[in-house]
Image: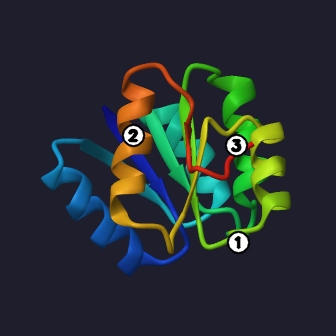
Amino acid sequence: MRVLLADPYALFRELTASLLVEWGFDVVGQASDGVEAVEQCRALQPTVVLMEIRMPRCNGLEATRLIKKELPGTKIIMLTIFDEHEYECEARRSGADGYVVKTAPIEDLRRALAALSCGDVACEEHAV
């Protein structure tokens, strides 16, 4: 799978990219805000985007709506610090295919990505 990382924190992106490469994924790009995420999706055509909700210029929810409208086949997993049910519901309404909080065990991210590669919806146990 071709993965794009969208998160405002460079250190988090780099560490996540290293982990994904170790797992055998192809990290094709990184974005520090929602505008970059949309632009890079257009240019790089990733299979999956790992998207934070709170980002500058354009938040992850709006970026998800824009990406899904233009590139509906692109899968998006919200990988976020927000562990509130309301955020998860809004992410789903925006078109997110999965939701993993950054405080979850690392295996949750691996399972979410594996579920997408099998065509399933990726979510945590408390997902709607």
Give the answer, above or below, for where 98 lies relative to 14: above
Q: Which mark is residue 25?
A: none
Q: Residue at x 47, y 19 (%)?
A: 119
Residue that sits furthest to the front in the current view: 125
Spatial CA span between label 3 and label 2: 17 Å
In-front residue for pair 128/46: 128
Q: Is residue 106 left or right of residue 64?
A: left
On-image quarter of the C terminus: top right
Spatial CA span between label 3 and label 1: 14 Å
Spatial CA span between label 1 and label 2: 25 Å
Q: Which of the 4 image quadrants contains residue 83?
A: bottom right
Q: Which residue is mark 1?
A: 56
* Circle 3 Cα neighbour tier, 10 Å, few/some/many (<14 / 14–19 / ≥20): many
Residue 66's x, y, as percent? 75, 37
Q: Is residue 121 left or right of residue 105?
A: right
Residue 97's x, y, as percent? 61, 35
Q: Which residue is mark 3?
A: 64
Sequence order check, earlier mark of 3 and 2: 3
Q: Nearer the viewer, mark 1 or mark 2?
A: 2
Residue 95's x, y, as percent? 73, 34
* Circle 2 Cα neighbour tier, 10 Å, few/some/many (<14 / 14–19 / ≥20): many
**Dot 2 amino acid type:** Leu
**Dot 3 amino acid type:** Thr
- Mark 3 and 2 residues: CB-CB less than 8 Å, in contact? no
Residue 16's x, y, as percent? 33, 64
Q: Which mark is residue 113?
A: 2
Q: Kindly state the secondary structure of the residue where label 3 is placed.
A: helix
On-image quarter of the N terminus: top left
Q: Residue at x 83, y 38 (%)?
A: 93
**Dot 1 amino acid type:** Pro
Sequence order check, earlier mark of 1 and 2: 1
